[in-house]
Image (cartoon, rainbow, N blue to C red):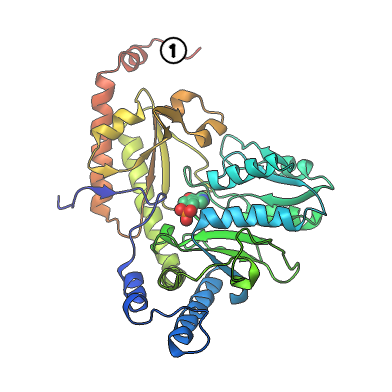
Amino acid sequence: MNVKLPIYLDNHATTRMDPRVFEAMKPYFLQLYGNAASRSHSFGWEAEEAVENARKQIADLIGSTPKEIVFTSGATESNNLALKGIAAAYADRGNHIITQVTEHKAVLDSCRHLERDGVRVTYLPVKPDGLIDLDRLRDAITDQTILISIMYANNEIGVVQPMEEIGKIAKESGVLLHSDAVQAIGKIPVDVDSAGIDAMSLTAHKLYGPKGAGALYVRRRDPRVQVTAQMDGGGHERGMRSGTLNVPGIVGLGAACEIANREMPEESKRLGFLRDKLRDNLTNNLDEVYVNGSMEHRLPHNLNLSFGYVDSESLLMGINDIAVSSGSACTSATIEPSYVLKALGAGDDRAQSAIRFAIGRFNTEEEIDYAGDRVIGAVKKLRELSPLYDMVKDGVDLRL
Ligand SMILES: *Cc1c(COP(=O)(O)O)cnc(C)c1O
């Protein structure tokens, strides 16, 4: 088999830049290096034109207008700006925000920050399939609620939330809806109008663009959403985000959106095929394999599996030529089971045996076959060493 090692299957963490994106960015480093805010010469005009072109490319992908795009340094900043900026702008209307427990840390930690400032935050639980319960969402809304923040698709389990229904609930209640759509944009169709989204975070490096370039979509009509700037400065980006624009990064983000928009239908089909092939290979050749999160409401390129009686850290070491991530996050010296997997109600065992596979644009079928076979071999080897697995196979019931 002719595969180049190591194989990258960690496309939820970041993606390789598409060479076409790189080509689009190149002139903006060495030749067209103007400041997009310079109004008095062609260097500035050319930079501004490139930025406005990118704004349109992003808007076309998400069904917004170009003026509704605010450039940031990435989705961490976009999430901070959305949550803190909306909380500040609407403080006279209410002081309650609703989010959910499986959000990215950039949302959860922004909420913690707001709680210290006196904002009340409801963290909705998720069902075992990773989706929120819409009745619980409805019940959580009070006359003090100003914002609902629910991610479009999860970065660990790939579960896609019912955004259109969430959007309807928000609209009926007169509450704004923000969505961290980093993992969904460019992978599945996202339309801010049909999903009723008022603010939305995205980042270039999760869709084959450069790191350090992102955007916040901010609705301008029905309703006109207010966002209080979180940094003081020159008042760029309609006063919401000061700072000289990262022109090459923005050009890259625009190009990445343009490519995704064009190629998504075919690409998502191909990724879905590879993902299902990987899943079938693993589940047909191994027992005690569990899918984490809904298979039906899921990004096409995500697979998150738990391998019973296998510790994911040991498995990672056994497949060291395949770049995947485990269901755990190393915080300092300790290995914590993933809070996302724990939120599904699965025990620590399930979380500690989980592996996230995230297939991307540049993966080939040969790579997926190779990766699957490597995992099968490594799991079998680890189970041979597992007294627990032996006992279960001998008919000892360990489940109490
Ligand atoms: C990667 C990621 C972020 C953070 O984006 P950065 O641009 O790296 O700051 C936020 N939310 C989700 C769901 C992500 O996957």
Q: Could you say whether the residue bearing mark 1 is in a helix, strand or loop?
A: loop
Q: Say which quarter of the image contains residue 362.
A: bottom left
Q: Is residue 39 above or below residue 374?
A: below
In the rendered image, residue 162, in percent from the top left (x then y), is placed at: 63, 51
**In front: 346, or 74?**
74
Q: Is residue 333 above or below residue 116?
A: above
Residue 104 visible in the shown view: no
Where is residue 79 shown, x and y percent of the image?
Answer: 58, 54
Count of numbered marks: 1
Q: Position of residue 163 (x, y in %)?
A: 63, 54
Question: Where 4 sits versus 343, above or below?
Answer: below
Q: Label 1, on which residue?
A: 398
Residue at the image position 72 percent from the left and 46 percent from the top: 97
Q: Where's residue 234, x and y in %?
A: 59, 71
**Residue 307 as seen in the image, left or right of residue 219:** left
- Which amino acid lies under the numbered mark 1 shown in the image of this protein? Leu
| Neighbourhood count class around disc 1 (C-alpha, 10 Å): few under 14, some 14–19, many 20 upward | few
